Image (cartoon, helix red, strand yellow):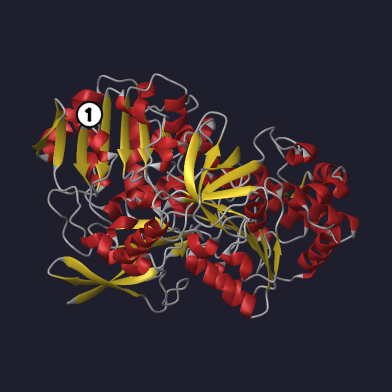
Amino acid sequence: MSYYRGICNFCGTGCGHLLRVEDNRVRGVYPLPGHPLSRGRLCVRGWHIHELLQTEDRIITCRIKEKNSWKEVKLEEAIGYLAEKLSKYSGWEVGFLGSPRSSNEDNYLFGKFARAVMKSNLLSLTSDAGQEESTLVLLEGTGWPAALGSLERLRQADYILVVGGDLTKQNPIVASEIHYAARAGARLVTISPRETQMARLSRLHLRPRLGTTRLLLQALSRMLLDEGLIEEDYLRNHTKNHGDFLAAIAAVEPEQIEVATGIELRVLREEARRLSEARSAYAFYPTGIQSLDRNTIAAIFNLFLLAGKVGKPGCGINPVTGISNLLGSYDMGLSPLLLPGYSPLSDEASLQRLEKLWGCRLNMEPGKSVSESLAQNTRMQALLVVDHDEEIIRNLKKIENLELVVYFGAYENPFARLADVVFPLTTYAEADGTYTNSERRVQLNEKKVEPSGEAQPLWQIMTLLAGAMGHRWNYSSAAEVMAEISQVVPQYSGITYDKLRIRPGLKWPCDQDHPEGTDCLLIDELSRPLKFVLESEPAQTREVLRAEEGYPFKLVVGRSNYFWHQNSIMKKTFIPRREYNALLLLYPGGFVEISSEDARKLNLREKQSVRILATNAELRLAVRISDDVCPGMLYVPYFVEEMIPEFLHRQVSDLEKNEEFYLPVRLEKVE
């Protein structure tokens, strides 16, 4: 019996664990003592990851669909078949949907194959909507597209602001670090329309009306201005365009915001003062389900920049990723907008540098995400998909009508059954690879067991496929792929497997100037001034207050602790599956949360059946009375697959975009 160090592959926290291996199978999991972030802890998901790794529900052979039946084939035959098929398409006819749970090495070569071999910029992730918005805001504001602060220093913070979502369910270990800091004396303030577990553990919960979080953050900035709490020297010496931002904030009307949000200005004035006086201040927000839109993320960034809390030790803005390697996937350029290392696709110098390194011409035309391509009826005829485990399959009919669908995955799931060609992938326990967590920590996860059946790492399959299409790639190990990544991605230029084997990860930028990585953004080390991120459109306080005629409720959706990755993954683990089934016993068809005030007005009782009606569809659910939601708000954690085709399928992609998005509905009793 042996124990091997590894990295949990569920959420973006990147906790350290020990896997117990016996007879080439993972038999147990234990927390890794001394890990700089998880510190010997695992959440309920992490404690059961060995059950996922033991599941018999694996894809272990290549297969090709012939006349609606499967034919098992050897890897070489599947590679040859796919290479011949792909050779018939242009770049604008092939889409690539990567996975935020794949390693950096896998994602890098998946993106390289798309751009260098197929000349396609139809490249995106099966990921959380808020990550791209967060990336673009932080890039514009600082040049850094990820966490600006250090989680290791969080327990010494004076002030912590958490905006949106519920980190206690989405990233429990990050949330526990926030709670440790609060117990040590930090003032913890939560902004969210729902009363989450994080809100209940906070010193202050600011509960704005749905759709007004951005207005509340703008009001806090206005309070800093009105109370004379701005560091003039900081703005003058370290920021640009502060004059434009101050003029925009001066135009904000606090009294209107007070009416729109329902939060008294005296409360906001006091919080602005507390933020200004804090020596160490952090902001957190999720980039997963219940994430924030661009303007709300910009409002958080601008507030902290105006308060002088960006680029100083003990300060930072930290987006929290919902899936294990979501940040690393963006680092590797799995985006229609960004190349590896975050250079815009439109940056001709960066594109030419990449062409020189890759030895081929690339397509400079602006790309689209796969979801945009499907929704807009573009020329896309083929789709390559990695590890897509959702039971809720977007654009199902359009995917079924494509000429070619290729699936690369480790586990059987509904999406795999749509494919024409299937390749078995290794699990993260069966291959070497690196993963980058929310705080920019690149960690090495080494192979612990031999692969099942004919499963191969994705980087190896893409290497073989590129070779079959005339592109000779000479990679014989994941370490060699990382060696090329270090040449292509500037933030990774100092990262090697040899370094990672003797360290609990390195935080990028890791380069010649920072050979041991970079703990946090420091203003004195930046080569450019900080920049306020001006809003793409002004907030409309009056529009927020207007109710849709005949549809007085605002419906939002989300997930919870046990209903993760749409449950294709979680239902393969015992405790989460048990909790899922227990909830189904209480609410077999799902439930809708409604406030006790609204329940009284409508004379509703617990578990009573109701109809939720939108303009073009309806849904029947059981009532769950909860004061976690405000009056006028409905909340549906969609964990029952049938709920989506019945009602939410047409709405869910919009509802998932950000926490501020809602669907106007009305609610009726079922007699």
Judge left or right: residue 589 versus residue 217.
Answer: left
Q: Amino acid at mark 1?
A: Met
Q: In front: 362, or 326?
A: 326
Judge left or right: residue 661 versus residue 44.
Answer: right
Q: In front: 253, or 21?
A: 253
Q: Residue at x 48, y 69 (%)?
A: 173
Can residue 291 be seen here?
A: no
Residue that label 1 marks: 469
Q: Indicate the quadrant containing the N terminus: top left, top right, bottom left or bottom right.
A: bottom left
Q: In front: 634, or 129?
A: 634
> 448 above or below 623?
below
In the rendering, at what x and y percent does residue 477 appear? 24, 52
Can residue 507 be seen here?
A: yes
Q: Residue at x 72, y 39 (%)?
A: 535
Q: Residue at x 67, y 60 (%)?
A: 311
In the rendering, at what x and y percent does residue 420 appear? 21, 31
Q: Residue at x 54, y 62 (%)?
A: 167
Determine the image quadrant of residue 423: top left
In the rendering, at what x and y percent does residue 604 appear? 58, 52
In the rendering, at what x and y percent does residue 481 appear? 31, 49
Q: In front: 338, or 6?
A: 6
Judge left or right: residue 655 versus residue 119.
Answer: right
Judge left or right: residue 414 versus residue 591.
Answer: left
